[in-house]
Amino acid sequence: MNMEIIGFIGAFLLIIAWTPEIIYIVRTGKSRMDNTFTGIILLATIILLAYSMVIDNLVFIIVNSFILFQVSISLYYSFFPRKK
C-alpha cells in the first residue's frame, strides 16, 4: 500500500474536523475559539507549512495550507466579529 495514501486520508480528516467550526464562525460572524489557542495553531501551521515546503511533502503542504486558511478565518472573526 502506498504510504502517501495514508497521509492524504489523515490530511482529509484534519480538514474535515475543522469544517463544522468554520461553518459556524462564518454563519454567526463570531469565533468561539480561544485567541491564544488559535494564535498558537496559526503559528504552528505556518512553521509546519514552511517545513513541508522545504522537504517538498505534498501531503503536508496541502493539509497545512487548508488549516492555515481555516484558522485565519477563525482568527479574523475573533478580532472583527460581525455586528448584528
Image: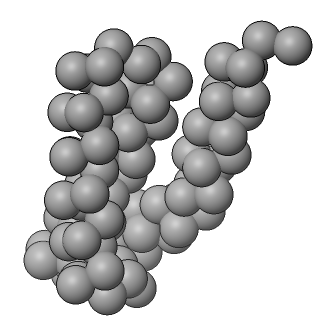
Closer-to-camera residue (60/12): 60
Q: Residue at x 29, y 43 (%)?
A: 48
One can see residue 71 in this view = yes
Q: Where in the figure is residue 44, as x and y percent of width and height?
A: 26, 57
Q: Where in the figure is residue 69, as x and y percent of width and height?
A: 31, 44
Q: Residue at x 40, y 47 (%)?
A: 67
As drawn, 8 above or below 4: below
One can see residue 30 in this view = no
Residue extending furthest toward the right: 1
Count of marks overlaid on the render: 0
Q: Where in the figure is residue 45, as x and y percent of width and height?
A: 29, 50
As drawn, 69 above or below 78: above
Q: Where in the figure is residue 7, as x and y percent of width and height?
A: 65, 30
Asked which quadrant contains residue 33, the reply is bottom left
Closer-to-camera residue (79/10): 10
Image quadrant containing the C terminus: bottom left
Q: Residue at x 13, y 74 (%)?
A: 80
